[in-house]
Image (cartoon, helix red, strand yellow):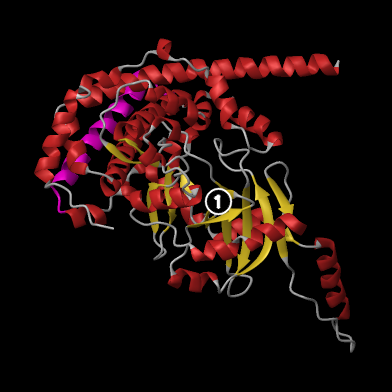
Amino acid sequence: MALMWLPEAKERFVLGQQCRKRMRRLEHKIWKAKDRREDPLMLLEASTRGRIPELVALKNELMAASPFAYFRGAVPVMAYDLSLIPNTGICNQLCGDAHVRNLGTFAAQDGRLVFDINDFDETIVGPFEWDVKRMATSLVLVGRGAGVKDLHCREAAAVFLERYRTTMAMFARMAALDVARYQVRRLQHVPSMEEIFRIAERATPMHTLLTLTEVEGGAAVTATKGAKKAAKGKSVKPPVAERPRRVFKTLPPRLTRLTGEVAGQVLGSLAKYAESLLPERRHFLAQYRPVDVAFKVVGTGSVGLRDYIILMEGNGANDPMFLQIKEEVASGYAPYVGVKARRVGVHHGRRVVEGERAMQLQSDPFLGWTTMEGRDYLVRQLNDHKASIQLESLRAAGLLEYAAVCGEMLARGHARAGDCSMIAGYVGRSTRFDEAVGAFAEAYANQTEMDWKQLVQSLKKTAKKVAVKKG
């Protein structure tokens, strides 16, 4: 394959400026609900096809909890809505589901805690502003949900947009390798981030082991301990007990231990998964052995998809590792991007892995993909020092601080996986882009609240019909 050389950075900056002819910066404020030809509820229903039917009701229940919860699960709706608006034509690798809860900490390969965008289920190549608009809207919704005044919610979106724009301008002036290596080093000194890192430090594999598993045959183990105690001081040697084995708890519907054929299929998928890893990482994976398997419900938008976790044991019982095998389907943006960006026929687990590796400074060393019964899966570590913002603790000052972090992180992800010079040329030095996207974010947050109410009313009607039938 021939290597494609990009034009010089200055030339790409000018190309970005010229994209304003395609879409003026002030046009980003446009949101017209009347342009919709699709019902949001129908779009959501269509997105659940192929999911586990019993869990679709749980997904709707989770989305009905708040406007922001609805927003988290309604990527197909926003993707459709964004497709109704003109775009810049400046395409970038998108996170796809850019919102405040999809940034968080995790353990890097060298063991240090890093903070970055950490959810890429919807990743795809598309107009860069789609991520920007989604993140800005999420800040408004989260602020409102935490009881922050509308003025401060608007300020948070403005802070995010200003930091995104100025950080992108900085990247456009930097050496290309410096952009690739760029780290945000001040995070642990940001007050709103301190709690995230504290939680992450406690979220060890051993903590997960104690949270999600239990000793198999607990009563039998207790009896063995009693027999040992009774034998003390006597000439009779107590029987040698096997080391207690830990297995997953069953806490339906969130966690269900699996055995038999399904567990065998999950374990069998590890062979294909290993092929997706670099050889040196395959070597370390081989030093762990699978102990137990469970089905786990995760997130909001992913509820209803198949998600398995495997307890692995390395150098003894105090060396657990948890692998998550998560079903991946086409990005919600796929119907609205070009055929080339859609990558028809691509393995969706691989799509997620490649998008994640492109945008993150450091990625989970065990990130890979596999296939089971014709379905695509992402594989990664579960809960390895993972933590994200605690929304209930947000206040106005914390929201503004966190908004600035969101701006830097999204800009870094876009610069790593796209063209910082072209984006910087388009957004420019003035606040025109910021003001327009800020106005869109407020308008779309209002729209989201209306769509959420429509979902809540629909669920109430359905529940009433069910009650009447039973009566």
Q: Residue at x 69, y 61 (%)?
A: 292
Q: Quadrant of residue 414?
A: top left
Q: Residue furthest bottom?
A: 235
Q: Residue furthest left?
A: 10
Residue identifier under label 1: 377
Which secondary structure dominates the residues rendered in magenta?
helix
Residue 30 to residue 7: above or below: above
Q: Residue 137: x, y in percent?
A: 38, 26
In the image, the segment drawn in magenta is 147-175
Q: Residue at x 53, y 59 (%)?
A: 204
Left or right of 38? Residue 168 is left
Q: Please say whether residue 320 is visible from this viewpoint.
A: yes
Q: Residue 318: x, y in percent?
A: 60, 70
Q: Please say whether residue 95 is visible from this viewpoint.
A: no
Q: Residue at x 85, y 82 (%)?
A: 238
Q: Residue 429: x, y in percent?
A: 14, 31
Left or right of 444? Residue 437 is left
Left or right of 368? Residue 127 is left
Q: Residue furthest front?
A: 1
Image quadrant containing the C terminus: top right
- Residue 170 forms part of the magenta stretch: yes
* Circle 1 SS class: strand
Q: Residue 341: x, y in percent?
A: 37, 40
- Kind of residue sitting beneath label 1: Tyr
Residue 233 to residue 390: above or below: below
Q: Quadrant of residue 167?
A: top left
Image quadrant containing the N terminus: bottom left
- Residue 6 forms part of the magenta stretch: no
Number of numbered callouts drawn: 1
Q: Few, some or many C-alpha atoms within 10 Å of disc 1 (few <14, some 14-19, many ≥20)?
A: many
Task: Looking at the picture, tell me which residue is in the foreground, 17 or 443.
Answer: 17
Residue 42 to residue 392: above or below: above
